[in-house]
Amino acid sequence: MAVWDADKNAVKRDLDQFRKDKDRVQRFFDSALQLGYFLALDRARASGTITMALFEHEYRRYYDALLPHIGEAKKVVPHIRMALDRLERVCHEGRDRRRIENLSSAPDVGNTKDAIHVLQGWLATLFGNYLKFYGFVHGTPFTEALIRSWAADSWDILQTRKSEHSMLTNHDELFQTRLMEL
C-alpha cells in the first residue's frame, strides 16, 4: 500500500531529482547503514540533500516498509511456542519413564536434543528479525555492538553457571549489563 502524501507530484519530482545524482544516492545509503535510516533521513533533510516533501514521504515509507517484516517475525512466535511445547512433552516423557537401563535404551535424551535444536532454529529466526529491526533504526555499528554484547553477556552467564555448577540458574541480570548501555 502506498503511503499518504500531501503532494504526490512533488514527491515524484523530488525523488527523480534525487536519483539523478548516483553519488548522492550512494552517500545516503551509506549513511543509512551507518546511522540508521531515520537519522540518515533527518540529516539529509537538515543538509538540504532531500526536500521536505521527500523527507515526509520517506519517513512514512520506512514505517510502512517495516510492517510486513514485523508480520513475518510475528509468524515465528507460534513456532517458538510449539517448540517449547515439544520440549515440555519430551521432559514429561522422560520424567514419567519407569524403567531406564541406560541412555541408549530410552529415546528421551535424543528427543530432548532434537526439541532443543528445533527451538534454536526458531529463536535464531526471531533474533535475525530483531537484528534487522535494530539495524534499520540504529545502523550497523550499533548492531555490531549489540551482537558483541549478546555474545559477551552469554559468555558471562555460562561462566557464572559453571562456577555455580548448575546450567539451570537464571542470570538474566547479566544480559542487562552491556545491552542497556547501547
Image (spheres, helix red, strand yellow):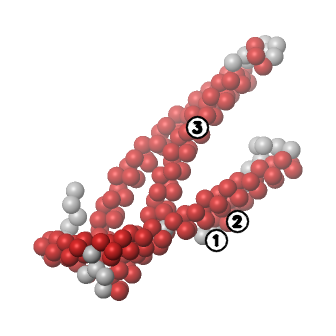
SS class, disc 3: helix
Q: Work out which residue is located at the far left of the displayed protein and give it.
A: 9
User: Which of pointers 3 and 2 lies earlier in the amino acid sequence?
Assistant: 3
Expressed as whole percent of the image width and height from the top left, the position of residue 84 reads 58, 36
Q: Residues within 10 Å of mark 1 (few under 14, many from 20)?
A: few
Q: Is residue 98 visible?
A: no
* Figure check: 64 above or below 159: below
Image mark for residue 119:
3
* Figure check: 40 above or below 145: below
Expressed as whole percent of the image width and height from the top left, the position of residue 80 reads 53, 39
Q: Are marks 1 and 2 in contact (CB under 8 Å)?
A: yes
Image mark for residue 41:
none
CA gap between label 1 and label 2 equals 7 Å
Residue picked out by circle 1: 181
User: What's the amino acid at mark 1?
Assistant: Glu
- Left or right of 182 on screen, residue 32: left
- Left or right of 132 on screen, residue 12: left
Q: Nearer the viewer, residue 98 or 19?
A: 19
User: What's the amino acid at mark 3?
Assistant: Leu
Residue picked out by circle 2: 177
Q: Residues within 10 Å of mark 2 (few under 14, many from 20)?
A: some
Name the residue located 81 percent from the left edge and 52 percent from the top edge: 159
SS class, disc 2: helix
User: What's the amino acid at mark 2?
Assistant: Thr
Q: Is residue 43 visible?
A: yes
* Figure check: 109 above or below 116: above
Q: Nearer the viewer, residue 18 or 121?
A: 18
Name the residue located 40 percent from the left edge and 47 percent from the top edge: 72
CA gap between label 3 and label 1 equals 28 Å
